[in-house]
Image: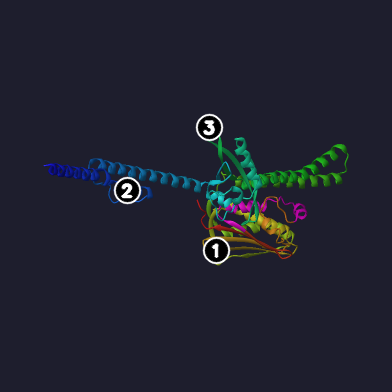
Amino acid sequence: MYWLILGVLCALFAVTALFLWRKWAAPWPQIEQLVSQIARGENPSTFLINGGADPHRVGLALETIFARQRELERQIAGRESGTQTILGAMEDGVLVVDARSHITLMNPTFEKMFELRDPAVGVPLVEAVRHATLDQLIAETVLTGEAMRCELSLADSRTRSERHIDVSAVPIKNGDDEVTGAVVLFHDITELKQLDQIRRDFVANVSHELRTPLSILRGYIEVLFDEPETSQEELIRILSIMERHSKRLQRLVDDLLSLAQLESSQATLELSAVRVDELFNNLIRDWKEKLAGKNLKVIVDLPSEMLTLRADETRLEEVLHNLLDNAVKFSPDNGQVRLQGARCGSNVVMSVADNGIGVSKENLPRIFERFYRADKARSRELGGTGLGLAIVKHIAQLHGGWVEAESELGSGTTIRVVFPEVPPR
């Protein structure tokens, strides 16, 4: 009897131990495997755990955790992608550093601006960008906890020119108001600098161009006041000089107004069908006396078929007037001027060529700049304002075209103006 009872108890103990093992111990390897797969970012084939209700609930909980983790990763990836898209689309450079001036974030514009070949996050800024002014700016921002600003000058190896960058550094602070780094913005102001320099040069040039004729006019007016009994011959000489310089002032003002109108956003074109042969004939007729004054021979070179384009006829007349004016001024007596028109693809090319003094290779790229003169003394002597070719360039651009120039010293100059047959809207 004793042995029977002992056997029953042993059997009950074994069954209980088996039950407890299957319910609590056996599921742990499965649970451990699931946790390991989730930690590695793997997708478990099943979350069902053998062993009863409790392990089953653990499996369901792990499945919920895994789903939430995937959703969180998806959201983070979306935000990261959005952030990178925004940073990549920014025209300004962006740099984020920590309190030790180690790079934590930068955008492609910053990398391009400083020509970084192998940009790396986490490296010290001084190793990636060797610029003492930038290092000092960030150090002061982190040290003082205040926003700082400065201007950098960078050498552009591609264009072999200098670029100007406006830099703004803002400190990053935590909840305890401790500085943990800085955000630095880089804005390229090279074009603004160039425009400002152009504006200053323009004001200086206009002042210089106005000063000479005004001084001459004022001087002769004072002479007339001081010497009221001036002889008739002297009076005629003075008045002729005053008339010449007053006309120069008028030409300068007219050219300035024309250029200002062309450069304004309100500049418009009155388009119509224009025949190039009629344009040339009208031009030669209007300039007949001046051409005859220097005994200049005019050659018109046009294709056999009718050459037409859709353009502003008044503007085209102004272009040819300015080009022929230069050709006549700088051509020698008994020289030759060629007016040529041709079709090149969907464009119409008109050119004016002379066999005058020509322009040097150094000066040729700048002849379309406002007030630029290759031969300043001779140009002023001939009454030029220095704005004619700038007006020509702007009229061509307003039609969607462009200008070209060829010249050699002593061999004359050719100016070509290219217009599309139909200008863009």
Asked whether 148 falls inside the magenta stretch, the response is: no
**In this orientation, which residue lies closer to the viewer: 108 or 220?**
108
**Place of residue 66 in the rendered image (x, y in percent of width and height, measured from the top left):** 33, 45
Label 1 SS? strand
Q: Residues within 10 Å of mark 1 (few under 14, many from 20)?
A: some
Q: In screen coordinates, is 286 left or right of 85?
A: right
The amino acid pointed to by label 3 is: Asp
Circle on res. 314: none
The amino acid pointed to by label 2 is: Leu
- Pick whichever of labels 2 and 3 is earlier in the sequence: 2
Task: Residue 46: tell me if it is visible.
Answer: yes
- Pick whichever of labels 2 and 1 is earlier in the sequence: 2
Give me the C-alpha separation between circle 2 and circle 3: 40 Å
Q: Which residue is mark 3?
A: 176
- Pick whichever of labels 1 and 3 is earlier in the sequence: 3
Task: Residue 258: tell me if it is visible.
Answer: no
Q: Which residue is mark 1?
A: 343
The amino acid pointed to by label 1 is: Arg
